[in-house]
Image (cartoon, coloured by chain):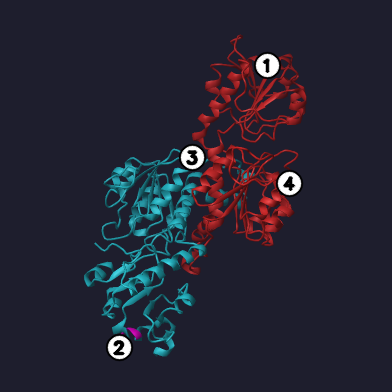
Chain colours: A cyan, B red
Amino acid sequence: MAAQIVENEEPQLPQILIHRLPSFDLPFKAQLVTRFRLIDPYASSDPTAFFSSPQAQSVRVLLPVGPSPVTADTLRCLPSLQCVIGSSAGVDHIDLAECRRRGIAVTNAGSAFSEDVADYAVGLLIDVLRRLSAADRYVRSGSWPVKGEYPLGSKLGGKRVGIVGLGSIGYEIAKRLEAFGCSIAYNSRKKKPSVLFPFHENVCSLAANSDVLIICCALTNETHHLINKDVMTALGKEGVIINIGRGALINEKEMVQFLVQGEIKGAGLDVFENEPNVPKELFELDNVVLSPHRAVLTPESFTTLYEVVMANLDAFFSNKPLVSPVDLE
Amino acid sequence: MAAQIVENEEPQLPQILIHRLPSFDLPFKAQLVTRFRLIDPYASSDPTAFFSSPQAQSVRVLLPVGPSPVTADTLRCLPSLQCVIGSSAGVDHIDLAECRRRGIAVTNAGSAFSEDVADYAVGLLIDVLRRLSAADRYVRSGSWPVKGEYPLGSKLGGKRVGIVGLGSIGYEIAKRLEAFGCSIAYNSRKKKPSVLFPFHENVCSLAANSDVLIICCALTNETHHLINKDVMTALGKEGVIINIGRGALINEKEMVQFLVQGEIKGAGLDVFENEPNVPKELFELDNVVLSPHRAVLTPESFTTLYEVVMANLDAFFSNKPLVSPVDLE
């Protein structure tokens, strides 16, 4: 079995266990294989066999590809595991509580995706406010010559944008939206001393003082359904929500109701609670833009992602501090 | 007849002739009427009657609403005309050659629309590169759960953006795109001494050195079909065109061919040669975003537009320099 799933048998090389969904390829395998001994159970017909093999006992580093779930069960099969090198921005697919309990370090993609996600968030916001996707549908359906002028959207400049989670993605969004003349405020676990934007200790207060909420915090037990009916009521009828974080950051059922009843003005949604399923009620609405979890990155950013992954691997194997550790506290 | 079409009969007030298509209302009539004697032939059942009336002989100021055509025929009926106060960004609906010949001054909306148009141009560009509208169609059609992951788009940061026409709209676009990490170059009638972006004397050279061309110059005899097959060949297979200027700035027939054959990568089009008609071939393409001439402005910008129009009227009637004159040379 081992011969099928191990790439580069050179015994003195550091060893990495690849963990992936069958549909995901390791994006930079060709580069990794020159420096590491890669074990890829999914290259065999029975991936689970590896996890009960003696080899699993010695695995120190796990490299999950994209959103491949790293459950407590998986972790239990790897008693020597010391580090999970994540290659995504959010790490809610990794059982962080179990990692914390076991003292396993976790890294994420650092800021490799931040620019792409920020670009997408701004794109969704312009789209919702100025109705780009809806206008495109209007033209393609042949309505323009028949029904005449399409309604004007609303202006981006001057909007008060509340950023929920001012990490590297939130910061990139703020930087961009300032160039459009928006004012920025934010909510985070704690106030960031180096940041001049106004801080709101709770999301309701941020929502009450914002025209737009952009959700880009991590999904944890604490942030699950952070955006609920109270927050949306505070945001109000003219308010817009952009979600490029995770679907479950919003109580989706409540949001759908608010959108359908016009209790908020619109939404740009890249993520959903039960992907790839999107609430059907949203398909009928022209004030929402629906995107299939594509804010994440572009092919151009794979190089940056590769650099972050390599830097974390190098740091781990030379006992130096990891470059993009996830705070497990 | 006069009684029906004149608002505010106060004889000592300065007089303005409103010129509008029947479908367009004067957006700030309530404010204008307190300060001016407004003549609005379209308030009567026979608008043409006014133009052959003795009253037409004394009209000094014409205020066309939106894109209402000001033809040589119209101008001929107004022998005392001294000034056309435009309320749009582009003034290709006004016979500028005839105005120049007669020494009639023309103003436009100045920079009242610049921010809105720039926002829209950036929105179209993100949409084309990151495939927002196409992804929204993918989700709405129910394809996500069936066909799986939607292809990733391409990165905005690092793109070389060539701006064709660096007026106030082009400048606002450049300011925004710099915040996304794009590099900017431009083509204009002449190099602008105060601008640090690289200048290209001809559009082909700009296209050859750009990943994206954003068309935002005025439509004149000189710029008609400025973007032709030579420019698109120079832009190349990976190139994207955004047009928020006028449809006829591009040879539309050639562009459709380039898009259909994959000779350029994509386009975001707010304007077309024969509006509201859009070439049907484009409806089938996922690499184009089609918009029904809506970049123009948002309701929030009407206040700014009103201020520009009033400032021009005040300037004219007090013999001061107009605030946003169109260069007729």
**Do tags 4 and 3 sit on the same chain?**
no
Disc 4 residue crowd, few under 14, some 14–19, many 20+, Cα 10 Å: some
Name the mark nearer the viewer: 4 or 3: 4
- Disc marking residue B208: none
Q: Which residue is mark 4?
A: B225
**Do tags 2 and 1 sit on the same chain?**
no
Residue A323, image x, y percentages: 35, 64
Disc 2 residue crowd, few under 14, some 14–19, many 20+, Cα 10 Å: few
Question: Decide: marks 2, 1 in contact (CB < 8 A)?
Answer: no
- Disc marking residue B1: 1
**Do tags 1 and 3 sit on the same chain?**
no
Residue A215, image x, y percentages: 37, 52
First reached walking from the N terminus: tag 1 or tag 4:
1
Q: Nearer the viewer, residue A127 or A306?
A: A306
- Disc marking residue A54: 2
Element marked by disc 2: helix
- Disc marking residue A155: 3
Residue B135, image x, y percentages: 51, 59
What is the distance, in whole Å, between disc 2 and disc 3 at their CAs? 62 Å
Element marked by disc 3: loop
What is the distance, in whole Å, between disc 2 and disc 1 at their CAs? 100 Å
* Residue B252 seen in render: yes
Disc 3 residue crowd, few under 14, some 14–19, many 20+, Cα 10 Å: many
**Do tags 4 and 2 sit on the same chain?**
no
Q: Amino acid at mark 2?
A: Pro
Q: Amino acid at mark 4?
A: His
First reached walking from the N terminus: tag 2 or tag 3:
2
What is the distance, in whole Å, between disc 4 and disc 3 at their CAs? 31 Å
What is the distance, in whole Å, between disc 4 and disc 2 at their CAs? 71 Å
Q: Which residues are magenta?
A: A50-54
**Residue at point 29% right, 77% down?**
A81
